[in-house]
Amino acid sequence: MSKLTAFSVLENKYGLELATKTLDAYKEIEENYFLEKWKPSELDAGHFVECVRRIIEWELCPPHTDFSSKLSNFSDNVLKSYEQKQGNESFRMLIPRTLKSVYNIRNKRGVGHIKDISPNRMDATFILFSVKWVLAEIVRLASNLSIPETQILIDNIVERKLDIIWKHNGTTRILYNKLVAKEQILILLYETSPLSFNSLINSIEYKNKSTFEKILKKMHTERLIEYENDCMLSPKGTIEAELIIKRVKETGR
């Protein structure tokens, strides 16, 4: 499990080009969403849809369309054709229908064309979590991992770029030194999770190891992180980290 990545799973099943283009499209969606660039985030969803349609073809009706050739328009007839194929229900129905919703948001709102509704957080959020589910489902089916294991692989795809974190020559620092240790831990794990005890304490430059251990155990008890050998951010911790980041960006403290 520890040696697997979402990329290695996809490359092993679908080849280098399809794995690379699919994950690159996903990364662009998530990174632009985090930067609150709604229009680029939603536009990139079109690339993701095109990549995953080729994965569906690979599964249901090989050979898949080469990237040098254009796919047909994503119509309801295409959905019906997928559904009538032999294969896993996720590839025949669940993934295509989710992609069609993403495709419609991308094309029918003010993203690819001028419309009454401009790109916005609500639409971008729908797209992000839809494509994240699609990618997780593909990885799950290709790897035979459990849903929790698959989620770990998906969560580790994007290393979030935060302007309150500075990296240089292997060293990571929080640039806002007024944040307490707990807040710094949450931000570090929000960008990259999991991290080891040593990585966290070295980044924060916390002097007392036993006290730092107590902080991590308390955060574990509060369900902000999962602390065993390494530290992993929980869904509750993610929400808390985003609130801290938002506060710092708005107030500088």
Image: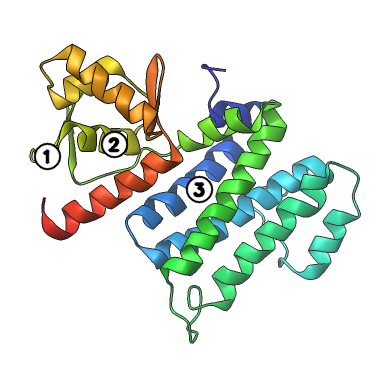
**Mark 1 lies on residue:** 175
- Residue 35, quarter of the rendered image: bottom left
Q: Seen in the image, is 17 located left or right of residue 200?
A: right
Question: What is the CA distance from the residue labelled 2 to the residue labelled 3?
Answer: 24 Å
56 lies left or right of 131 = right
Residue type at tag 1: Leu
| Residue nearest the viewer, comparing 132 with 168 | 132
Cα distance, mark 2 to mark 1?
14 Å
The amino acid type, in three-letter code, at marker 2 is Leu
Mark toward the start of the polypeptide (2 vs 3): 3
Q: Position of residue 69 (x, y in %)?
A: 67, 55
Q: Could you say where residue 249 lies in the image, as x and y percent from the top left?
A: 18, 55
**Which secondary structure lies at badge 3?**
helix
Labels 2 and 1 touching (C-beta < 8 A):
no
Q: Which residue does the numbered mark 2 point to in the structure image? A: 186
Left or right of residue 162: residue 7: right
**Residue at position x 63%, y 55% in the image:** 50
Determine whether the residue tagged by mark 2 lies in a helix, strand or loop: helix
Is there CB contact under 8 Å for labels 2 and 3? no
> In the depicted view, which residue is nearer to us: 244 or 36?
244
In this view, the mark in front (1 or 3): 1
How far across and down, in percent of the image, does residue 203 sit? Answer: 18, 25
| Residue lying at 73% horizontally and 59% vertically, measured from the top left | 97
Q: Amino acid at mark 3?
A: Tyr
Residue at (83, 46) in percent of width and height:
89
Q: Nearer the viewer, mark 2 or mark 3?
A: 2
* Label 1: which secondary element: loop
Residue 204 pos. (x, y %): 16, 26
> Which residue corresponds to the image point at 73% horizontal and 56% vertical from the top-left?
96
Q: Which residue is mark 3?
A: 26
